[in-house]
Every structure is written in C-alpha cells, then in structure tokens.
Image: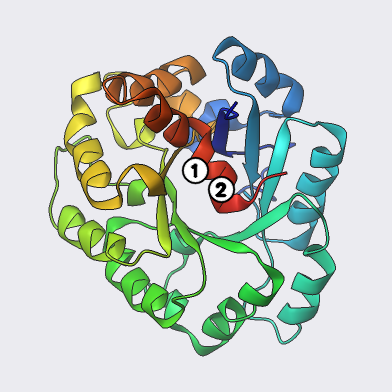
Amino acid sequence: MTLRIDSHQHFWRYNSDEYPWIDASREPLKVDYMPPDLEPLMQATGIDGAVAVQARQNLRETDFLLDLADQYDFIRGVVGWVDMRADDVEAQLERLAPYPRMVGVRHIVHDEADDRFMLGGNFLRGLAKLKACDLRYDLLLFPRHLPIAIDVVQRFPEQPFVLDHIAKPFIKDGLLEPWERDIRKLAAFDNVWCKVSGMVTEAAWGGWTQADYVPYLDVVFDCFGIDRLMFGSDWPVCALSGSYSQVVGIVETYISALSADEQAKIMGGNATSFYQLQ
C-alpha cells in the first residue's frame, strides 16, 4: 500500500527575531505550530506522513526538525538548511547526511535581494556537494526566478531538484505568462520534480474557488507528468487562505479522474520516491 505523504509543511516555536518573514500580513502565524497541531489534521484527511521543511536560515533549524522527526514517527523526512555558501559546507552536510530522515536542503531564495543569488560561485559550489551526500534540493522561487533556476539545474543533471509551490504564480490575478513559458522550460529537465503546494496563498485569501487553480494545475500536470508531481500542504502557511482539508481537497478534486495508481503517486508515492523516505 502506498503511503499518503504531505511533501511540504513547517513547524516552529514563534518569535519575531527568528521568523522575520512572518510579518503583519501573516498575523495568524505568530503562534507556535508543532507536530501535535498537525497530526489530527493529517489523520482527518487520511495523510500518513509528512516532510518537514525549513523555515529559518540557520543550522539550529535543521537540528530542531531532526529532533522532532526523532520524536514523531509521522515526520518521514526533513528538508533542512545549511549555509550553501560557507567554506565548510561539505562538513555541515557530512554531519547531517547520516541522519536517516535528513532528505534534502532548502534556502529561501525568493527573499534574497539579488535575483541571481543561486548563480553565485559559492552557492553553486555548495550545490555541487549535495549529490555525494544523496540529498535533494528544494527550489523556493517566484516566477521571475525561473530563468535562473533553469540555468542552475542544467549545470547539475545528476542532482535531483524539486520546485516548491509551482513557483508561486499570480493566481489571484489570473496571469499565466511568462510563468507558463518558464515552467515548461524547467520541466524539460528530468531531474526536476514539482510540488503541487502553496497555491492557496497565491489566490485571493479565503475568496478562491476550485476553478481558480485549474489553469495552473493543467500546466504542471501537462509538463511534469504524473511521475514528477507530489502533493504538499504548506501548512501552517496555507491556513491564511484555506484549511488543511481544503488544501488536500483541491488536489484530490483535480486528480479524481485519474486511475487509483496515478492518484496514489501524486498523493504520496512520488514524494516517497523522490525523497527516498524510510
């Protein structure tokens, strides 16, 4: 039986210094969100496990998530943070890679002042170290970063990448281009997968309909295909615009015409395969 996996969610003990991105517009997120808060939501929607993804840019974040994964079996994997530009990045990775649930690394690229951040020499050197540690890399981008991501992924054909939140297209405004053009170019590289996640916060908060997502889902399903897409909730951030069950329902409704095997891939099989979840 294929496990149903939420490929993207977060935990934190909130304080303003550690989470500067949680600004006044995200006031409901200024509280603690921990595994006991998520577990009943997963159980109610038939989700068996989750991948916890970093939300802070420090090594304490990675250790925090790995510690939670040791305490809660439903946390099947951790996408942590390391300083990809550091001289000792290799040592950082080698310390973390032996943890069975350490599955990947992410940097909050879309908050960097330089849109070409990923093309920096030190960052590229860090990316080159991931493959030897058998770690995946999550791409957190805005649509304007997609051309840079295309440049990056073609330099590392053996490195598995996954695009978070379908690159946050302008769903609220109903804009497809140039996002669609660049998504199709990125999807042409078969080492790049995509998370069907994070869409509700790019739509009108609390005022969206299922139809708002269909044009964007049509694009990613067409260009990534059934085998390189995975469901993710982006909980608790998703709660700004929709409940956990609503977020699960968006994807389940869209894929309802697919075969049972195809649905199982989207709702867990692909995440399990990509992240090599235990």
Say which amino acid is labelled 1.
Asn
Bin the neighbour count of mark 2 within 10 Å (Cα to Cα): few under 14, some 14-19, many 20 and up: few
Image coords of residue 172 (percent x, y): 22, 34
The numbered dot on residue 270 is 1
Residue farthest toward the top in the current orientation of the protein: 44
User: Which quarter of the picture shows residue 9?
Assistant: top right
Are the residues tagged 2 and 1 within 8 Å (C-beta)?
yes
**Residue bearing mark 2:** 273
How many marks the image carries: the answer is 2
What is the distance, in whole Å, between disc 2 and disc 1 at their CAs? 5 Å
Give the quarter of the figure containing the N terminus.
top right
Side of 277 where 158 appears, left or right: left
Residue 127 in percent (x, y) is at 57, 77
The quadrant in which the C terminus is found is top right
* Residue positioned 34% across, 22% down in the render: 250
Residue 140 in which image quadrant = bottom left
Judge by depth and name the residue closer to the eye, 145 or 45. 45
Is residue 160 positioned above or below 264 on the image?
below
Q: Tag 1, which secondary structure?
A: helix
**Image point (51%, 64%), residue name:** 160
Front residue (pair 126, 265): 265
Please rate how many residues cluster around mark 1, counting C-alpha atoms within 10 Å: few if below 14, some from 14 to 19, many from 20.
many
Q: Amino acid at mark 2?
A: Ser
Q: Position of residue 227 (x, y in %)?
A: 39, 46
The dot on residue 178 is: none
Local SS, label 2: helix
Q: Is 262 on the left-hand or right-hand side of 264?
A: left
